[in-house]
């Protein structure tokens, strides 16, 4: 091998000719494309991995296929860590799904700017117009999947943020579960007592992939009034005092004076992010409606001891919450867009079952007064949280920004970099991303 | 290893062997630890202080990857892809080696140089256009996409050219005088002589393919086509908690088993392949 | 037994003078045997390589047609701290892993170059990691490198191997040395075994001590193998990908170039920029290989 490296230099000219021939051969090869079989329609449907949701999806797909014998649904779950990569590459070259399920930040951060999704087909949905559709949902809840006044998806789940405490642990530490922490300082104080009672993993943020880092920081940013970029997405704003304050809350609870757990011992399971809370290792956690259901299924004993309380606040007098949703959408590259929207219409029509079976809250009007809605544990906490929330601001190339946020948090939490320094570094990365 | 040896030399050798032996124990301790931990009850993994032996051997852990994940499917896929790629390589590289070693034609040396130059292209670097190309062939999420682009190798061609170059020309001429065509000469005269290097090549390619991660990660997105490295990586991303440690270790060790067994039984061939490729012999 | 040289000696390579000229149609038939391999190469290696060079001059996100931007991708990379960091981290990983692995392999090869019964088994202990795929090795080492895992407990340390910039790289390096030493041990052993015993005997009769024999017999004879090993080490080092993806996902100062390319291309859909990185890496590797060969060739003389 080695010898030929040197000799090959002398042959570069002759190699050039061979390479040209190769180019021609390859060009003719790449001219051939895929094919499309006629007759029955096959819809590819991709979601992330969340076992309770997968079960209901499979049931609904079976029902839909029975009702529509000419439609076949090919359902695939993408592992959560590979999700963004897999989805984006397959979507952008047309091998992706017809129907997909995406969170609103990814949707607005990557898919809509890249024009990968088809706008809603109101005819196929059985609603005449956008206004008619919007009238079915709570105000602004469809905004998670909208760009330039056009709607691109229907919510499969719509989440606000709350807090869960383990009443057993609280009792062990002599704390009153009916007086849960109202501020992050309260969380730190309670953590000290819990720690003293042997519950050393009192409260921890989750260190999964960049999406998780960003959504947790965003929750804190909403409370401190900070942002990641300016509204026009021209410049990073993570160095602002408000943004640094949010990062400080996180860092203090992870490693600082208010240290509430060892972040190196926090479990990192992308399919069951709440396993520490669910197995009774952890005493307090930030939770979402779907998460509570997952805990109930996997660890009913711990679930019985959990109490759902409002999210701790920077300013409890003016609580702020964070919204995020997953939406069903249709690929612009799909050749069966109408059928795809019809299928989505069926999925969306089952919001009562999404509530009762999976505890996915779809923000249709009256969900909380419906029969299934009233069964949702902690309904009052969720209802209040929904009233105080807002969607994240997302910039184009949001994946790069999420990476920068993750690196910033890792810097302060695991590498003990000072907050101003870490946020300055993140700002530089984000600015470069925004500027290119 | 002949001739008189001084006492000092023997002592020196003894010391060297002892040190190498201790090092070997350190090296293998990682695998011993992995095997023993794989058989522990989930509550005992990562215990402090470290207990090497499980309190009870949980043999049921061995089936966890099969019951909890599509591990069997990943295994099958890796086998199908590995065997196909290996066969393809043996055929294409032997044929090309024959051509480069025993025929003279215009452009032969240039073509060979181009092939060798590609050894210096780290394959990862061309994945962007390769992905588009394979997509346009309609081979994303297909075995063709996993197999065909890996169907030949510069290393293999180099190795087979070397090996066939050693086959005496007289042997080939004799076959020709007997009226054998070139293909028959290759199959019935050359191949029996170079069986050894071909086996070495096969082993080497199979092991290389068993290790292949990035390309299958891009090209195989569904469980039907995921190979072991991609599947393992996905399983691991989903199950990092200590409860899943035994399952992940069982999966990793089972995934390692075929190549380890092949290697142990065919160690000679592997060494031959590596050294031949490096031009040492 | 074997001829020790990087350059295949005359009998091994089909030197024109020794080859009986093949006449007539045979030439064409002979060329045909190379066609399957060459066709695969042209389509799946050379064409993509050229395409990488081409795409490196474009802004291309897969979803919209490529837009020509000249050398913009390169000028971006020239000032990109992330690319700089990736390059540096690759060098640290490669050097950190392969310098010790090569040194260890060289020493072990001397110790194990005997035909005693034990040495065969001992070699196997070092060879085993070579036979295990990188991903499987990573999965195993995630447990070894756990704060409560084997490494910390064996050494009495309390390091967070995979979650701190101070140690993540070194955790991967320790794993890399474990995985890769055996590979080079194979090469060095083969090299040692191809040194005729008579040379050592002659040196011994001349009164050369163990060190002198190594310095004046083994080392020069081993130089070609060392050259091959060092070229391979650089290539393998720069191809690092799986452990970084599986164990740290590039966090804590372990974002190697391959992972950077992968993320730039397939997570962030900046295909043009990723291609530019690929071009730079190709040139760098090509240059490094030539440089190494030159250095070793000069010493060889």
Image (cartoon, grey):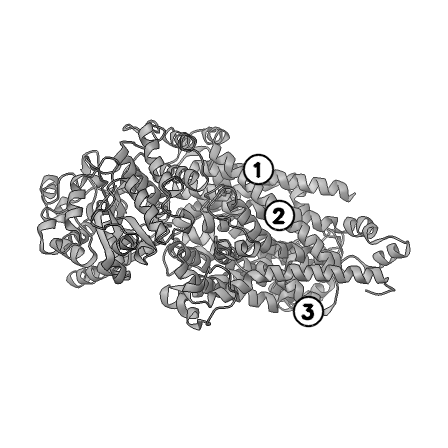
Q: CA distance from mark 1 to mark 3?
A: 50 Å
Residue A338: in sight, yes or no?
Answer: yes
Whole-angstrom CA distance, mark 2 to mark 1, is 21 Å
Q: Dot 1, how many residues are within 10 Å of its Cα: few (below 14), some (14-19), or many (20+)?
A: some
Chain at tag 2: C
Where in the figure is residue B128, as x and y percent of width and height?
Answer: 44, 44
Q: Are circles 2 and 1 on residues that touch, CB within 8 Å?
A: no
Q: Is residue A160 left or right of residue A424?
A: left
Question: Do callouts 1 and 3 point to residues on the same chain?
Answer: no
Quick check: A78 left or right of B91?
left
Asked if disc 1 and disc 3 are in contact, CB closer than 8 Å, the reply is no
Snapshot quadrant of residue A53: bottom left
Of residue A8 and residue B269, the one placed in the foreground of this image is B269
Chain letter for mark 3, please.
Answer: B
**In which chain is the residue bearing label 1?**
C
Is residue C23 visible in this depiction of the protein? Answer: no
Q: Which residue is mark 3?
A: B178
Q: In the displayed structure, would residue B25 be above or below residue A232?
A: below
User: Earlier along the polypeptide chain: callout 2 or callout 1?
Assistant: 2
The N terminus of chain B - image quarter: bottom right
Residue beneath label 2, please?
C98
Rendering coords of residue A9 (x, y %): 64, 39
User: In the rendering, at what x and y percent does residue A123 appear?
Assistant: 12, 46
Q: Secondary structure at mark 2?
A: helix
In this rendering, which labeled residue sits more in front, label 3 or label 2?
2
Say which residue appears at 47% left-offset and 35% top-offset: C82
Name the residue: 39% across, 32% down: A423
């Amino acid at each position: 091998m080695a010898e030929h490296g040197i000799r090959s230099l002398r042959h570069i000219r002759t190699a050039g000719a061979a390479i040209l021939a190769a180019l021609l051969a390859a060009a003719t090869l790449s001219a051939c494309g895929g094919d499309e079989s006629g007759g029955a329609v096959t819809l590819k449907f991709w979601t992330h991995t969340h076992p309770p949701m997968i079960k209901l999806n499979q049931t609904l797909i079976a029902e839909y296929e029975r009702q529509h014998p000419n439609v076949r649904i090919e359902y695939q779950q993408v592992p959560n860590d590979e999700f963004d990569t897999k989805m984006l590459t397959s979507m952008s070259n047309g091998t992706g799904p017809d129907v997909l399920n995406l969170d609103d930040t990814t949707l607005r951060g990557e898919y809509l700017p890249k024009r990968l999704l088809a706008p809603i087909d109101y005819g196929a949905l059985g609603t005449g117009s956008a206004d008619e559709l919007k009238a079915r949902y709570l105000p602004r809840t469809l905004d998670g999947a909208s760009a330039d006044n056009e709607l691109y998806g229907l919510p499969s789940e719509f989440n606000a943020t709350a807090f869960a405490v383990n009443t057993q642990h609280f009792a062990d530490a002599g704390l009153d579960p009916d007086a849960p922490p109202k501020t992050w300082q309260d969380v730190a104080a309670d953590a000290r007592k819990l720690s003293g009672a042997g519950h050393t993993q009192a409260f921890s943020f989750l260190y999964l992939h960049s999406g998780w880092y960003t959504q947790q920081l965003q929750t804190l940013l909403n409370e401190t009034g900070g942002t990641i970029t300016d509204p026009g997405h021209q410049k990073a704003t993570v160095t602002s005092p408000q943004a640094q304050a949010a990062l400080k809350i996180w860092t203090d609870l992870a490693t600082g004076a208010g240290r509430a757990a060892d972040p190196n011992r926090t479990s990192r399971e992308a399919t069951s992010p709440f396993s520490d809370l669910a197995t009774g290792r952890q005493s307090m956690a930030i939770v979402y409606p779907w998460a509570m259901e997952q805990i109930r299924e996997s660890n009913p004993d711990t679930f019985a001891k959990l109490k759902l309380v409002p999210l701790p606040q920077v300013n409890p007098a003016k609580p702020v919450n964070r919204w995020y949703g997953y939406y069903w959408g249709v690929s612009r590259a799909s050749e069966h867009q109408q059928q795809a929207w019809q299928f989505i219409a069926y999925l969306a029509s089952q919001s009562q079952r999404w509530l009762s079976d999976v505890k996915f809250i779809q923000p249709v009007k009256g969900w909380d007064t419906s029969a299934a809605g009233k069964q949702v544990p902690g309904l009052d906490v969720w209802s209040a949280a929904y009233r105080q929330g807002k969607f994240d601001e997302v910039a184009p190339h949001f994946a790069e920004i999420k990476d920068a946020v993750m690196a910033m948090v890792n810097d302060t939490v695991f590498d003990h970099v000072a907050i101003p320094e870490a946020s300055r570094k993140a700002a530089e990365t984000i600015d470069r991303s925004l500027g290119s | 290893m002949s001739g008189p040896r001084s006492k000092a030399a023997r002592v020196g050798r003894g010391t060297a062997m002892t040190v190498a032996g201790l090092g070997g124990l350190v090296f293998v301790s990682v695998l011993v630890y992995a095997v023993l931990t794989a058989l522990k009850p989930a509550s005992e993994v990562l215990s402090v202080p470290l207990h090497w032996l499980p309190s009870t051997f949980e043999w049921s852990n061995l089936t966890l990857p099969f019951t909890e994940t599509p591990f069997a499917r990943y295994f099958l896929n890796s086998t199908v892809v590995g065997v196909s790629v290996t066969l393809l390589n043996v055929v294409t590289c032997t044929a090309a080696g024959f051509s480069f070693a025993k025929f003279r034609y215009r452009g032969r040396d240039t073509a060979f140089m181009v092939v060798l130059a590609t050894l210096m292209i780290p394959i990862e670097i061309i994945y962007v256009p390769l992905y588009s190309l394979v997509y346009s062939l309609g081979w994303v999420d297909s075995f063709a996409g996993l197999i065909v682009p890996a169907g030949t190798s510069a290393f293999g061609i180099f190795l087979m050219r070397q090996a066939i170059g050693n086959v005496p020309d007289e042997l080939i001429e004799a076959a020709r005088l007997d009226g054998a065509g070139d293909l028959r000469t290759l199959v019935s005269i050359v191949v029996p002589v170079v069986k050894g290097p071909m086996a070495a090549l096969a082993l080497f390619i199979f092991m290389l393919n068993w290790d292949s991660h990035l390309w299958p990660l891009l090209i195989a997105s569904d469980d039907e086509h995921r190979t072991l490295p991609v599947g393992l990586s996905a399983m691991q991303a989903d199950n990092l908690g200590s409860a899943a440690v035994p399952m992940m270790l069982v999966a990793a060790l089972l995934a390692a088993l075929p190549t380890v067994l092949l290697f142990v039984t065919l160690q000679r061939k592997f060494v031959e392949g590596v050294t031949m490729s490096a031009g040492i012999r | 037994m074997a001829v020790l040289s990087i350059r295949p000696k005359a009998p091994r390579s089909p030197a024109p003078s020794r080859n009986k000229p093949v006449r007539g149609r045979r030439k064409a038939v002979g060329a045909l045997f190379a066609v399957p391999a060459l066709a695969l190469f042209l389509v799946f290696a050379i064409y993509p390589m050229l395409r990488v060079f081409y795409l490196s001059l474009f802004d291309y996100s897969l979803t919209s047609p490529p837009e020509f931007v000249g050398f913009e991708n390169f000028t971006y990379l020239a000032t990109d701290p992330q690319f700089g960091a990736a390059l540096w981290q690759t060098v640290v990983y490669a050097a950190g892993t392969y310098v010790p692995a090569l040194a260890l392999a060289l020493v072990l090869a001397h110790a194990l170059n005997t035909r005693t019964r034990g040495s065969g088994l001992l070699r196997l202990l070092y060879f085993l990691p070579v036979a295990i795929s990188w991903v499987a090795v990573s999965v195993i080492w995630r447990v070894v490198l756990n704060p409560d895992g084997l490494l910390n407990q064996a050494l009495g340390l309390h390091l967070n191997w995979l979650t701190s910039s101070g140690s993540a790289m070194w955790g991967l390096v320790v794993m890399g040395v474990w995985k890769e030493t055996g590979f080079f041990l194979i090469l060095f052993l083969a090299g040692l075994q191809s040194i005729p015993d008579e040379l050592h005997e002659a040196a011994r009769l001349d009164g050369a001590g163990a060190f002198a024999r190594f310095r004046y017999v083994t080392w020069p004879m081993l130089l070609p193998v060392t050259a091959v090993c060092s070229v391979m080490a650089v290539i393998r080092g720069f191809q690092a990908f799986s452990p970084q993806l599986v164990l740290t996902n590039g966090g804590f100062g372990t974002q190697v170039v391959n992972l950077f390319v992968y993320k730039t291309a397939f997570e962030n859909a900046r295909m043009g920029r990723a291609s530019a990185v690929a071009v730079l890496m190709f040139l760098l590797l090509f240059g490094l290989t030539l440089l190494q060969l030159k250095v070793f060739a000069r010493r060889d003389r």
